Image (cartoon, rainbow, N blue to C red):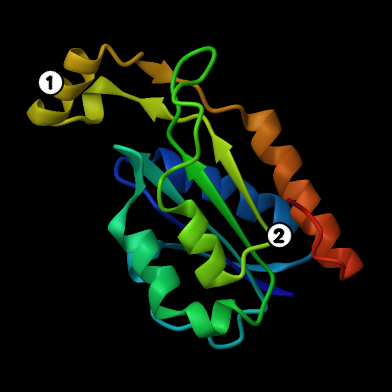
Amino acid sequence: MKILVSAGSKHGATLDIARVIGERLAQRGHVVVLAPAEDVDDLTGIEAAVIGSGVYAGHWLAPAKELIEKHAATLGGIPVWLFSSGPLGDPPKPEEDPVDVEDLMAMSGAIGHRVFSGRIDLALLGFGEKAIVKALRAPVGDFRDWDLIDSWAVEIAEALDSGTGAAG
């Protein structure tokens, strides 16, 4: 099966998550097209999709939202899963889903959505971003749970392999 794995990623952390998901799907024998959301122009031949975004101020990044909006008709006819990356700390905060996920799930016909913790690397941030991190007292570090990400990718692979599309 040919699967698009894509993400809107401001500083690379969310694209890293997409890469791990794509690697796991490829290990299961699927053909994976890995691309940043802003580079996805054509879904010809795509039979399933996993699309994610970094979350800032409770919202997905524009390139990931635009990918879903532009290709909603195609996505509605194939198995689709969405993921968000953004909560920080231990336990991760914020706890709620991003504001726009419900609409994106409806638009894409997504089977499921997962939220994964994110990463803040001060070396990658601009002056304004550093000021926001300091003002919000956001925890700095890499909070991504690679085992959780890997197990979700396996769930997707199993759903695709069984033809049920049942992974949440």
Q: In the structure shown, which secondary structural element does the residue marked by tag 1 occupy?
A: helix
Residue at 51% across, 20% down? 92
Instruction: Classify mark 2: helix, strand or loop.
Output: helix
Q: Amino acid at mark 1?
A: Ala
Q: Which residue is mark 1?
A: 131
Q: Nearer the viewer, residue 62 or 23?
A: 62
For residue 47, above or below residue 139: below
**Image location of residue 53, percent across then percent down:** 43, 50
Amino acid type for the residue under numbered disc 2: Ala
Residue 120 located left or right of residue 83: left
Residue 165 placement, left or right of 49: right
Tell me which residue sits at (51%, 55%) in the image: 102
Judging by the rendered image, the residue that carries numbered circle 2 is 26
Kindly report the distance in space between the C-alpha atoms of the residues bearing marks 2 and 1: 40 Å
Residue 164's disc number: none
Q: Callout 1 environment at 10 Å: few (<14), some (14 to 19), or many (20+)?
A: few
The answer to whether residue 140 is above or below residue 108 is above
Tell me: 158 left or right of 33.
Answer: right
Relative to 12, does residue 1 appear above or below in the rendering? below
